[in-house]
Image: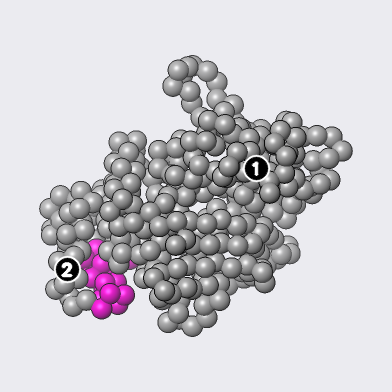
Amino acid sequence: MTLLTVKDLEVKFATAEGEITAVDKISFELEPGEVLGLVGESGSGKSVTARSLMRLNAGNTRYGEGSSMILRSGEEEVDILRLKTPKQLRKVRGDLVSMIFQEPMASFAPAITIGKQMTEQLMLHRKMTKSEARELSVDLLNRVGISEASKRFDQYAFELSGGMRQRAMIAMALSTKPKLLIADEPTTALDVTIQAQVIDLMKEIVAEFGMGIIFITHDLGVIAQTADRVAVMYLGKIIETGPVREVIRNPAHPYTQGLLNALPKLENLDAPLTPVPGDIPSPLERPSGCVFHTRCQRAIEGKCAQMVPPEVQVVAGHTSACFLSEERQGVAA
Ligand code: SF4
């Protein structure tokens, strides 16, 4: 049974300059045990999408009337966007869904020990006794590779190294055995060796716990190592999606092609990197037609600035929203 079905998610923010669209009617699904990578530059809407899953966006947020985010757990089905009371929201936050952040200090209260934070969460969401919660927390700290786990349990986040803090945050996020784990740039601040360890650890977790993971990053290279499927976002839209290897070997959208060209090539490390030209436009100046046309070197005159490209099937399970893909393959059924 599909774990998560996001349909026509639209997220708008009220600002002093007017309402902006941060996420523009995106749809995707996630199966249990699957890792979905959400990739895009800053401002693409990937973090807003993730925060919507825990309803963590600020108070000036408005969700589209036709938007839904259905999360399934056993017989239970919850539309996250329709939750209202603090009790209903608590069921999602830290119970069905956990989140790990780029900066672990964002997860830990500085004046409370790591152990106390872990046990309080377990006592609240899993109704454990204090000693059961302590036992499980120390065990999980061990499992994520933290040496002297029972000593670390009584320490504060600032007393741990960056890599250790990241692992402690993963242990805390996993302790309640959520159905869905959201990892928002979890490896960006780490050095490469620790990054590889954290990625390996997350793969083990998926295999063992069978939870679904949404892995958010700006780095397609990291996604290639972690995700089963990828959705590439640009200015609030999913512009290409498919199995990760298929998309990386056969990118159909000029933006995805640009992101891949910007990665260093192992076979020629002296080759200059070619970043996608220009910057992502301000959401207050959302381009007409194809939202990527202001930066696209293959834009079709008289078409791309005027018309919104349809989602086109490149091969089964791989879609791209670009007129060039339409010319190649025909519109998706
Ligand atoms: Fe470029 Fe046009 Fe394709 Fe958009 S639809 S990515 S502007 S070619």
Of the residues shown, which amino acid type is indicated by label 1? Gln
**Is 194 placed above or below 139 here?**
above
In this figure, what is the number of numbered marks?
Answer: 2
Q: Which is closer to the viewer, label 1 or label 2? A: 1
Q: Nearer the viewer, residue 90 or 191?
A: 90
Range covered by the magenta-colored residues: 109-127
Residue pictured at 42% horizontal, 82% vertical: 87
Sooner in the amino-acid sequence: mark 1 or mark 2: 2
Mark drawn on residue 87: none
* Position in image of residue 19 (x %, y %): 71, 64
Give the Cα distance between marks 1 and 2: 50 Å
Residue highlighted by disc 1: 313
Quarter of the image where one finds residue 312: top right
Residue 83 visible at all? yes
* Position in image of residue 68 (x %, y %): 59, 68
Q: Quadrant of the N terminus?
A: bottom left
Quarter of the image where one finds residue 316: top right
Which secondary structure type mostly characterizes the magenta part of the structure?
A: helix
Of the residues shown, which amino acid type is indicated by label 2? Arg
Q: Is residue 112 left or right of residue 152?
A: right
Crowding at dot 1, Cα within 10 Å, few <14 / some 14-19 / many 20+, comes out as many
* Position in image of residue 256 (x %, y %): 60, 37
Which residue of the protein is positioned furthest toward the right in this rendering?
302
Residue highlighted by disc 2: 134
